[in-house]
Image: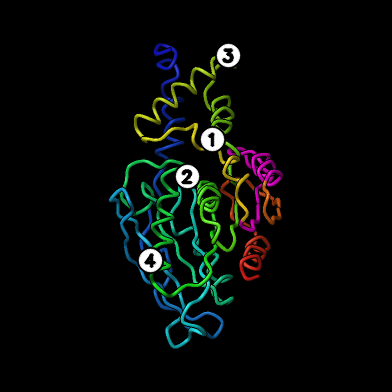
Amino acid sequence: MNLLLSLFSSSYEELWKAIIRPFRDEYTLRDLGPSKFRLNQKYYKRTDFSIMNNRNLRLKCSFWEPYDEEREYPRLPCVVYLHGNSSSRCEVVPNLKYLLPLNITVFAFDFAGCGHSEGEYISLGWYETLDVQCVINFLRKSNKVSTIGLWGRSMGAVTSLIYSSKDQSIGGIFLDSPFYSLNLLLDELSREKVSLPNFLVKQVIIKLKETVKEKGKFNIDDIETVKFAKKCFVPAFFSHGKDDTFVNMHHCKDLHMVYPGEKSILLIEGDHNSLRPNKLNEKACIFFYW
């Protein structure tokens, strides 16, 4: 097996890094837009700060809200945006113009191991769920928010599902490109990324699980998104790109099929990393508004 992996070392390294150490998004605070701005005749502000997660890693966060004198109520609804695995809180910026005018505040942060936050590895939903718990605790103690919704993309979508299956007080979840099962996703990616006969793919996955457990400190077998989806009753809006070759569209459709709560789905043009169309962002915001 070691000889086999050495023959495909570059492909294997690419594969495990795609799981727990993808490209870290590089950006500056300027990429988050102005800290004070006007939108639809109303003034808003962005506050940047850090909170510590339960692994003692610093998470870099941003909170967008109206000026104090512009707030209609002391506590407003809040959408927490959860980015994908090679992304950061910058991912939320295009959606601010849709959410803020609806009197919805927006919170975004870099998961541990992503963007400006501390941490070396990601876990595709496992430890990220604990990051979300820290954020939710912070928001509820702030006395600035009422109902909380989660908007997740890719890894963030899986994290939204896992977290909401344990916290049914979440008002709604928008799930863009979630995967059905990490095992299934790895099987599909292994066949595509590593040029091996089918009978050897299982051996590669066994080695992948060992590498992930050693470096990332979590078990791939624990991230069966479908198991969490089956016990989640938070209203959910699913979406997926029809041309997604990283996480095939069937993952989202299959999750939607077994989801027991109130649900809807919209399949869109584009791939895993495509800029989402305005109509999808608008429908997502209407979903949270109602």
Q: Is residue 63 above or below residue 224?
A: below
User: Looking at the image, is mark 3 or mark 1 earlier in the sequence?
Assistant: 1
Residue drawn at x 65%, y 70% as measured from the top left: 290
Q: Secondary structure at mark 4?
A: helix
Earlier residue among tags 2 and 3: 2
Single out the mark in the foreground, 1 or 4: 1
Relative to 43, say whether 231 is above or below. above
Q: Residue 126, how many percent across, how many down? A: 45, 43
CA separation in Å, label 3 and label 1: 19 Å
Q: Determine the residue positioned at 31% across, 50% down.
A: 118
* Residue type pointed to by label 3: Phe
Q: Which residues are drawn in magenta?
A: 234-258
Q: Which mark is residue 182?
A: 1
Q: What residue did someone put label 4 on? A: 30
Q: Residues within 10 Å of mark 1 (few under 14, many from 20)?
A: many
- Up the image or down, 47 lies above or below 21; here it is below
4 vs 3, front mark? 3
Instruction: Name the mark on residue 125.
Output: 2
Counting other residues with Cα less than 10 Å from the Cα at mark 3, is it few (<14), some (14-19), or many (20 or more)? few
| Residue in the foreground of this view, choosing between 112 and 189 | 112
Quadrant where the N terminus sits is: top left
